[in-house]
Image (cartoon, helix red, strand yellow):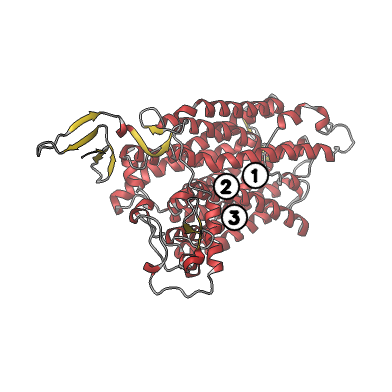
Amino acid sequence: TSSRLLLPLVYSPQGSIHPSSSSFVLKLAQMGGKMEIERSSWSDDGNLVQDAVDYRGCPANRSSTGSWLGAASVVGIELCERLATMGIAVNLVTYLTDTMHLPGAASANALGTGLLAVSTTVRHLRPPPCGGAAPCEEATGLQMGVLYVCLYLIALGTGGLKSSVSGFGTDQFDEHDDRERAAMGCFFDRFFFIISLGTLLAVTVLVYIQDHVGRSWAYGLCSGAMLVAIAVFLSGTKRYRYKRSSGSPVVHILQVLVAAARKRGLKQPLTAATLYEDRPEHARIHHTDQFRCLDSAAVMAGEEDNEVGPDGRPAPNPWKLCSVSRVEEVKMVVRLMPVWATTILFWTIYAQMITFSVEQATTMDRRIGGFEIPAASLTVFFVGAIMLTLAVYDRVFIPLCRNLTGRPGFTNLEKIGIGLVLSIIGMVAAAICEKKRLTVASTATNGTALPISVFMLIPQFLLVGAGEAFIYTGQLDFFITRSPKSMKTMSTGLFLTTLSLGFFLSSALVSLVRGATTWLGDTINHSRLDYFYWLLAVLGAINLAAYLLCAMWATPAASSKAEQPHHAAAADEKC
């Protein structure tokens, strides 16, 4: 009798077993009391990436897929997206007031960007220019309808892109490989840097084209940038690594909630060891005592938990019985929610930097010698503050902190807190500046730029910009490291919803304040925007207090070996 045993394994320095570059077939034959060992093949299995496939569905080859080969295309996509979206967004308020003839407060409620190149080119899709003594004609219902269709289409596309692009970028790196794991740590830094670079180009080059060449040309360039992004994305198809889907995280969450609701009357066991678990030891997430009501989903109730499986045998019905690890994944998501809710207001404050602050700049003296700075280009100080803060924090603060305290900088929760504090101070600075501007406006001649330098706005841009550098990286780190491994994309999308909800809250707040007060009039010189900024500062302080309570409550989620986050310090050093 003989048997063949394929052993494509090798012991790695990290103490785990991986496919090896050599395969041996052991032919065990009993031939006169002797054993014959035959080497039959030599394969390249060690170059394959675990849990990843290529575009054909075959195991991904490390040398020809992923890493920076694939991630570079992802970064290029984000550069084009930022250039297009921000190129329209930062000048959208002036477009709505100057071209579409909307009141200032209504202009601050635009919710996205879109096919504006068409609407700015076709004469019937915009009202006639203002001229003579007659009042400006506002846009018709049809013109506004076309505008909002354009805006919502791009908002929809941007939402789909941004919720997936960072997760897809991290999929290009193998967490089991030290070198690629270190490169993944660098990916987030470069990813956010590219976001800032795209925004910088948008608020300088594209804004200049909008103001001095024409909006149709600028918006056409934005459309061209997105076409380039599509071409770049498709060109990398053969270089990408793809992860097989483990099912919808939303469905998994609903299964736990439904199973827990069905068994809410059952008595829970005294120890977690008797709860249902179907994962191997190394992949389990250990039980925690928080949210014990969800543990009911893992209480075994006998045959009523089963259904007929594909093979005809009884199998657990996931809508009636969930594993402890699945329940703990839902608990991890629940722990994210308080911090998620208390970071929304930052993005409401951020929205003022590209709406009302730009409108403030249009009334002020923007001349440097014989050159007049476009109002929307003032956000270059905002973007510059982000990039400068990131550079100083990464190259100066982290090494200093590591030498003095042994810590690799601030934790993700500390970063979020710093961002919230800076945003509050930024609103205080904005209120003081606006009070000064209104004082000058009260004595100035209508129709002329106010004799006050636009550089008075720089402090609010710098403060909120530095705040974004901290809160964006802190939120991204928090939502990735505190979420289940199988729900990374969903958690990234959850983080991004704080941005969109922050803008929605800004729109709602502007409408509410405009309806209840006279602070936000049709013209900024006859409004009390400083009161609105003070309101945001007060709301920010209340929100900060709530955040501090949530941050103290938030504790690192219990994790298995599979869920352990990698330390950024080691990755930074190797990078």
The mark that comes first in sequence, 3 or 2, is 3
Q: Is residue 274 left or right of residue 167?
A: left
Residue positioned 74% across, 28% down in the render: 118
Locate the C terminus by quadrant.
top left
Mark 2 surroundings: few (<14), some (14-19) or many (≥20) residues within 10 A: many
Secondary structure under tag 3 reads helix
Foreground mark, 3 or 2, reads 3
Name the quadrant of the N terminus. Answer: top left
Horizontal and vertical percent for residue 418? Answer: 47, 54
Q: Position of residue 350 (x, y in %)?
A: 59, 48
- Which residue is the site of mark 2? 460
> Which residue has dot 3 on it?
345
Which one is earlier in the sequence, the residue at label 3 or at label 1? Answer: 3
Q: Which numbered circle lies on residue 357?
A: 1
Q: Residue at x 60, y 44 (%)?
A: 457
Q: Amino acid at mark 1?
A: Ser
- Crowding at dot 3, Cα within 10 Å, few <14 / some 14-19 / many 20+, comes out as many
Q: Nearer the viewer, residue 435 or 341?
A: 341
Query: Tag 3: residue type?
Result: Leu
Please say if 320 is above or below 406: below
Residue plotted at (41% across, 42% down): 392
Q: Position of residue 431 (x, y in %)?
A: 63, 53
Figure label count: 3
Q: How far apart are labels 3 and 1 at the CA level?
A: 17 Å
Q: Secondary structure at mark 1?
A: helix
Tell me, yes or no, whether the two marked residues, 1 and 2, touch with CB atoms within 8 Å: yes
Q: Nearer the viewer, residue 416 or 10?
A: 10
Q: Is residue 567 left or right of residue 433?
A: left
Q: Residue 12: which disc?
A: none
**SS type, badge 2:** helix
Q: CA distance from mark 3 to mark 2?
A: 16 Å
